[in-house]
Image (spheres, helix red, strand yellow):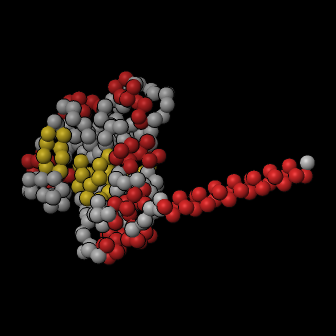
């Protein structure tokens, strides 16, 4: 009995020793060398792992930068400050980056837009693609207000207020997660410096838009005709602003009869 226990102990010990030696040798033989710069870059990245850079978290971006597969300013969360540190590590000049911020192209809140029916189903924006007219609001282009963008934002920078998603521009890190989460494609990243934006996405003709929402763009072209910088384009009954041409004069806001253009 005692000899059996001793024998089992010896066998288990030998097996453990063999496995340990095997793993040790395998670890040395198959060890993956890590670029020292990759570790340095990872150390200065913010660590949010939001994926806004297009890579699988901060470690994926650090590897890409170290291998020359991504620019040193690829982190939207870190901005210029982190970009400068990464540039110093990589031994290159820091590149200027334009600060961006998310913007919801809709003002159709509970007071300004009409409802076709009362919806009592699952409060998920993605699910409303399967209900009549894509949701209860009369405007088929409007914000559904069920907060898929809110759930996607890891910076607590977007909230639903009175039925419409609103971005806190100071909290926003322009990671783009809310852009991906919106099934209506109502959210876009715009230059932080842009003061005047079109807060509507409707491409319906004017009379249709006016029946659905008090503040929808009706494609009247008054903004385009009065813009001194020729920065406004109207296509498919929908105004758009060229931020590079825009002089930030605010004429478009003054001339818009539906107040679809706002100061951000």
Camera-nearest residue between 49 and 157: 49
Question: Number of marks in the image?
Answer: 0
Task: Determine the residue positioned at 43% across, 42% down.
Answer: 148
Camera-nearest residue between 15 and 244: 15
Where does the image place residue 87, in percent across and percent down from the top left?
30, 72
Please indicate whether residue 27 sits to the left or right of residue 205 in the image. Answer: right
On-image quarter of the C terminus: bottom left
Residue furthest to the top: 132
Where does the image place residue 132, in percent across and percent down from the top left?
37, 23
Task: Determine the residue positioned at 40% across, 71% down.
Answer: 36
Task: Determine the residue positioned at 64% across, 55% down.
Answer: 19
Where does the image place residue 82, in percent across and percent down from the top left?
36, 70
Task: Determine the residue positioned at 80% across, 54% down.
Answer: 9
Camera-nearest residue between 208 and 214: 208
Where does the image place residue 106, in percent across and percent down from the top left?
31, 43
Image: 200 above or below 167: above
Camera-nearest residue between 220 and 34: 34
Please indicate whether residue 217 sits to the left or right of residue 187 in the image. Answer: left
Residue furthest to the right: 1
Task: Note whether residue 45 is visible.
Answer: no
């Amino acid at each position: 009995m005692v000899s059996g226990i001793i024998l089992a102990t010896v066998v288990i010990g030998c097996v453990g020793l063999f496995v340990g030696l095997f793993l040790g040798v395998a670890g040395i033989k198959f060890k993956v060398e890590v670029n020292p710069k990759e570790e340095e870059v990872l150390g200065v990245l913010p660590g949010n792992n939001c994926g806004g850079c297009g890579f699988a978290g901060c470690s994926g971006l650090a590897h890409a930068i170290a291998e020359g597969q991504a620019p040193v300013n690829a982190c939207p969360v870190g901005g210029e400050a982190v970009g400068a540190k990464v540039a110093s590590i990589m031994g290159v000049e820091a590149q200027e980056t334009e600060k961006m911020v998310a913007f919801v192209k809709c003002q159709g809140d509970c007071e300004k837009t009409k409802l076709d029916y009362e919806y009592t189903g699952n409060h998920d924006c993605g699910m409303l693609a399967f209900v009549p007219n894509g949701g209860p609001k009369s405007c088929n282009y409007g914000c559904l207000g069920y907060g898929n963008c809110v759930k996607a934002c890891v910076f607590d920078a977007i909230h639903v207020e009175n039925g419409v998603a609103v971005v806190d521009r100071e909290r926003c890190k322009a990671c783009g997660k809310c852009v991906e989460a919106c099934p209506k494609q109502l959210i876009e990243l715009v230059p932080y410096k842009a003061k005047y934006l079109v807060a509507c996405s409707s491409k319906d003709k004017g009379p249709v838009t006016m029946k659905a929402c008090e503040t929808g763009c009706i494609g009247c072209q008054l903004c385009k005709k009065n813009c001194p910088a020729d920065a406004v384009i109207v296509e498919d009954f929908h105004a758009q602003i060229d931020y590079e041409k825009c002089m930030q004069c605010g004429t478009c806001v003054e001339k818009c009869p539906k107040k679809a253009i706002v100061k951000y």
